[in-house]
Image (spheres, grey):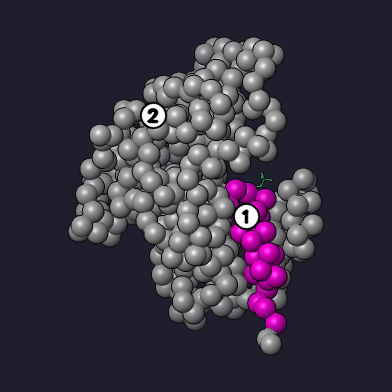
């Protein structure tokens, strides 16, 4: 039997990269995991038998070294500035190393004139990676991850509030996939290029949920009542600045504000849910409540106690007293390219035509 191809997983300590590396190891594929530092996540990767490569993903020298002897790769740019630089480095290294097949993590929103610079860079990265005909590519177009909601699970657990700027609580706007399900699709495509080369998949959860339904699912998993509260963009910026979840930079926050606007406009509801998780991996997609239950089981500090409730009130007060920064100013300070005629996805004819099958209604559905 021929040896299994070696697969490079970039961003291997990240939300999807870690799951991709572990699932590949469970199928006995040789995996090289690109990480920037050793920590508890690299311990998990090492225990699973992955080869660790510690380096800088934005450095072409490091990426060249990481690609040596690799036949396939998972391209996952961090949610951070310089995404296009990452894509150029990754693409150049795949060309030089004559990599055979790449699975790239794109965005459901990826479109040519999008207001988000990060998203336009994803769009350009998608073009770059597809330019060498000898290398096949599978594109995984993900919308809003389930993990994003879990950033505020502490507030839900201790204060009974699910606070995000998602607009009307009754409108079903997203069928969020778990990191594990996204990885299942990536792994399906990495391990069977013959079936998946040239295809684009969009992993989603099994059902569209409204913000109120998300709060109810959190409540059931946490064993308490949780209510959704729509917050302003300004309050979101204050919270992200005060707490810096997942180390989001100020630059990343400017883009999250744009993604929240896409959420309120219903862009993630278009053509969702899909069957892609089941069709590629043979697994039924995970329900949001199961994702929350797993998180609750992993995180003992989500169990309610008086001291944790007092701590959560302290965090809430910290958010209230944090000064927000100006989003436009932050983008200008960084010399971000800003288009004079940017368009959100559903205002862009090319995006709408590409993303909306004729038999699917674009309008977000209301809870009956
Ligand atoms: N979140 C969403 O809702 C959403 C939706 C659609 C698409 N996406 C796409 O998802 C991608 C992000 O995927 P993800 O969430 O799986 O990744 P992630 O959790 O953001 O992980 C990125 C990883 O890259 C590592 N990293 C950062 N800079 C590095 C460097 N210079 N050298 C080496 N490693 C470095 C980070 O390491 P440390 O952890 O050690 O800092 C982190 O583990 C983005 O391209 C985004 O466009 C996200």
Is residue 336 shown left or right of residue 173?
right
In which quadrant of the rendered view does residue 34 lie? bottom right
Bounds of the magenta segment: 3-29
**Disc 2: which residue:** 212
Q: Specify the quadrant of the image occupied by residue 94.
A: bottom right
* Residue nearest the observer in this picture, 32 or 160: 160
Q: In the image, what residue occupies the spot 61% across and 38% down?
A: 295
Determine the residue positioned at 51% across, 60% down.
283
- Few, some or many C-alpha atoms within 10 Å of disc 2 (few <14, some 14-19, many ≥20)? many
- Measure the C-alpha gap from mark 2 to mark 1: 29 Å
Residue 106: give x, y in percent of width and height: 46, 56
Q: Residue at x 36, y 51 (%)?
A: 273
Measuring from the top left, give residue 233's x and y in whole percent. Answer: 40, 25
Judge by depth and name the residue closer to the eye, 92 or 216: 216
Q: Quadrant of the C terminus?
A: top left
- Residue 77 in sight here: no
Badge 2 marks a residue whose secondary structure is helix
| Residue indicated by mark 1 | 19
Q: Position of residue 165 (x, y in %)?
A: 40, 28
The mark nearer the N terminus, 2 or 1, is 1
Bin the neighbour count of mark 1 within 10 Å (Cα to Cα): few under 14, some 14-19, many 20 and up. many
């Amino acid at each position: 039997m021929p040896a299994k191809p070696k697969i490079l997983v970039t961003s291997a300590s990240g939300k999807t990269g870690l799951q991709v590396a572990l699932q590949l190891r469970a199928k006995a594929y040789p995996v090289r995991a690109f990480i920037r530092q050793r920590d508890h996540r690299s311990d998990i990767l090492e225990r699973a038998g992955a080869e660790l490569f510690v380096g800088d993903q934005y450095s072409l020298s490091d990426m060249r070294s990481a690609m040596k002897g690799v036949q396939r790769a998972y391209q996952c740019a961090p949610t951070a500035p310089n995404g296009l630089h990452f894509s150029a480095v990754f693409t150049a290294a795949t060309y030089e190393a004559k990599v055979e097949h790449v699975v790239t993590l794109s965005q459901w929103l990826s479109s040519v004139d999008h207001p988000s610079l990060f998203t336009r860079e994803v769009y350009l990265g998608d073009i770059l990676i597809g330019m060498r005909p000898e290398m096949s590519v599978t594109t995984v177009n993900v919308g809003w991850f389930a993990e994003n909601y879990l950033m505020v699970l502490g507030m839900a657990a201790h204060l009974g509030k699910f606070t995000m700027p998602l607009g009307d609580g009754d409108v079903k706007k997203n069928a969020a996939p778990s990191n594990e399900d996204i990885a299942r699709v990536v792994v399906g495509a990495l391990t069977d290029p013959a079936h998946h080369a040239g295809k684009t998949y969009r992993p989603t959860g099994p059902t569209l949920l409204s913000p109120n339904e998300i709060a109810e699912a959190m409540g059931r998993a946490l064993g308490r009542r949780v209510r959704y509260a729509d917050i302003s963009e300004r309050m979101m910026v204050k919270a992200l600045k005060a707490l810096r979840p997942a180390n989001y930079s100020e630059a990343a926050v400017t883009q999250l504000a744009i993604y929240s606007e896409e959420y309120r406009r219903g862009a993630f509801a278009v053509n969702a849910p899909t069957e892609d998780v089941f069709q590629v991996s043979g697994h039924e997609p995970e329900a949001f409540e199961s994702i929350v239950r797993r998180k609750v089981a992993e995180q003992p500090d989500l169990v309610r106690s008086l001291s944790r409730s007092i701590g959560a009130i302290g965090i809430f007060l910290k958010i209230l007293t944090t000064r927000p920064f100006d989003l436009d100013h932050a983008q200008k300070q960084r010399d971000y390219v800003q288009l004079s005629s940017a368009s959100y996805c559903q205002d862009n004819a090319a995006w709408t035509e590409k993303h909306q099958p004729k038999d699917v209604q674009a309008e977000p559905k209301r809870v009956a």
